[in-house]
Image (cartoon, grey):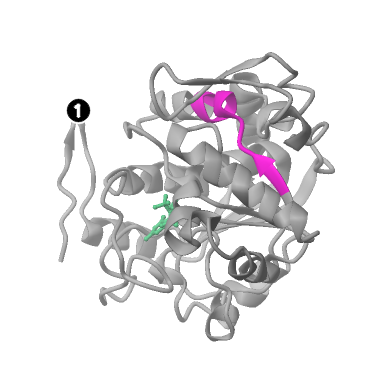
Amino acid sequence: VLCWFYIFPGYRLPADKEIVDEVLRQGEAWQKNQTGIDLYRKLLTECCDPPRMFAVTKQNSPLGKVMWYDGEFYHSHTVNNETYPLFVQENPLQLPLKKCAVVGNGGILRGSKCGKDIDRADFIMRCNLPPLSKEYLEDVGTKTHLVTANPSIIENRFQNLLWSRKHFVDSMKVYGTSYIYMPAFSMSPGTNPSLRAYYALADASANLTMLFANPEFLRSVGKFWKARNVHAKRLSTGLFMVSLALALCKEVTVYGFWPFAIDLDEQPVSHHYYDNILPYKWFHTMPEEFVQLWHLHKSGTLRMRVGRCP
Ligand code: CDP
């Protein structure tokens, strides 16, 4: 069993067992707190202007605009005649979104029977093109409105789209007509795979709409959480999505955020609901992120589902 006695200045991260005890102590009790919801929407709007900035648009990234990559130093892309036409005109989402579900990929979802609950949301966000095959549907639901895709997935799972694009286009069908949100301008090796993914979908007249994550937005959200005890080099995809949801939605419920080795019954739990491959980096930040999300749960600003759904 992994232990989480990581020492931060003046701050000790609780061990898995302590987290379990704390969650059980809190129980099912949860009450929505409109003041907390309004406060976080205001704070996030002030720092990061999500409605205008979350995606790269023609409006916020005109021809000639220099976009600085947020995942590395001194790398930029100047918007040109090749890239500008790939951007959506402006934020395509109808705001505010009502009930949002942010679905992380934690193993805690396995056997949760949260699928129906998730599918009842008005807007469902998922991370990293997760599997939605039959065996998982009862636990994770069927619908998706926005799904993130890391360029590394294009490389690893789809041979960088240098060979057949059919497998990729077919695999995207489970996400219906959703937006696919790619950090194309975060790390330089990620740009070309992201542009190839755009063309693969466009050429196949796929139902999905590509949105490129705006590096300026990602950087500002990173700073926002850095000021709130998340010391990671880079936030997890899930926390970016929760931040987006807090700014755009009237109500947020999160599922599948549980970066611990044991579940609420103290039984071992896998890292993902579909495998147990641990991330080689950024892993240590997720428990820190969890602590912050748990504060938001307790204050009624968002709701976290960590056990089975009713
Ligand atoms: O790419 P990354 O490792 O950040 O994400 P992932 O493993 O595909 O999972 C999506 C998101 O779910 C993560 O970014 C975390 O925010 C969350 N997650 C979690 O809280 N606990 C887990 N055991 C696994 C994922």
Badge 1: residue crowd in 10 Å (few <14, some 14–19, many ≥20): few
Seen at 49% across and 54% down, the residue is 160
Q: Is residue 88 magenta?
A: no
> Image check: 104 left or right of 164?
left
Question: Where residue 284 sits: x, y (%)?
Answer: 26, 46
Question: Where residue 282 sits: x, y (%)?
Answer: 31, 44
Task: Tell me the quarter of the image containing the N terminus.
Answer: bottom left
Please give the residue where the numbered disc 1 appears in the rendered image: 10
Residue 301 shows in the view = no
Look at the numbered disc 1 and say if its residue's Cβ is closer than 8 Å to ligand 1: no
Residue 254 shows in the view = yes
Seen at 75% across and 18% down, the residue is 62
Task: Tell me the quarter of the image containing the C terminus.
Answer: bottom right
Q: Nearer the viewer, residue 278 or 110?
A: 278
Residue 19 lies, with reference to residue 176, above or below; the image says above
Residue positioned most to the bottom: 135
The image quadrant of residue 285 is: top left
Q: Amino acid at mark 1?
A: Gly
Seen at 35% across and 31% down, the residue is 229
